[in-house]
Amino acid sequence: SQKIEQNSEALNIQEGKTATLTCNYTNYSPAYLQWYRQDPGRGPVFLLLIRENEKEKRKERLKVTFDTTLKQSLFHITASQPADSATYLCALIRGNKLVFGAGTILRVKS
Amino acid sequence: KAGVTQTPRYLIKTRGQQVTLSCSPISGHRSVSWYQQTPGQGLQFLFEYFSETQRNKGNFPGRFSGRQFSNSRSEMNVSTLELGDSALYLCASSFSSGGTSYNEQFFGPGTRLTVL
């Protein structure tokens, strides 16, 4: 069956460093992949969408890569800030349904 | 534009009861999806409605149902509640032209359902 795997452990980094989050998937070839941010008690907020023919996409301090050979997407936050602390979810289309990974908790310490 | 709104925000029910949750999408969005989020299972897709028709359905029992009205507002119903139905129920709307591609989803704040 298809799986989406994100770092199960929380990622703790120092303010100013680059945070890198991983999303791996198996048994599927999605046309595109999305990344969301979720704060406690709130709904997810869309961040970026990357298509299978795009290797990289950027938005301000955010960068997403999509390697369809490795079946992996990397999500980078450069110059991280404590306000970036949240859970980050990747999601991909499977049979016309949006399937989410379990998410990775990011903690940025000042 | 106003965001996605969900009512009620919190709900406490007992086993065997039924519940109806409401979602108002962003103006102009015709696609509304529902998700269940629990600590153990994460965010799971329930169903999606587009122009008053259920377009996609997740792997949930028939106790979970929904509908969409002509103004794109949507309701979700859970009958014969079980303890395991305790979760955060999220509604998301998106601008869809009618195809099945998923544009960015705009989520509401969710309804926290507790079943005792």
Image: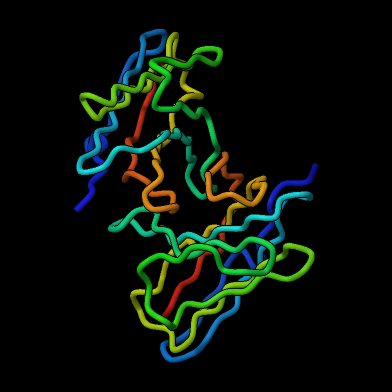
**Image position, residue B36 (x, y; %):** 44, 62
Q: Nearer the viewer, residue A62 or B55?
A: B55
Q: Is residue A30 left or right of residue B96?
A: left
Quadrant of the rendering where the C terminus of chain B is positioned: bottom left
The residue under the point 43% across, 78% down is: B115
**Image position, residue B19 (x, y; %):** 55, 81
Q: Nearer the viewer, residue A47 or A56?
A: A56
Q: Nearer the viewer, residue B25 or A41?
A: B25
**Image position, residue A83 (x, y; %):** 51, 24
The residue under the point 52% across, 86% down is: B18
Quadrant of the rendering where the N terminus of chain B is positioned: top right
Q: Does residue B18 sit above or below A29 in this rendering? A: below
Q: Does residue B30 sit above or below A105 in this rendering? A: below
The residue under the point 39% across, 58% down is: B44
Q: Does residue A110 sit above or below A98 in this rendering? A: above
Q: Nearer the viewer, residue A32 or A106?
A: A32
**Res. A51 image quadrant:** top left
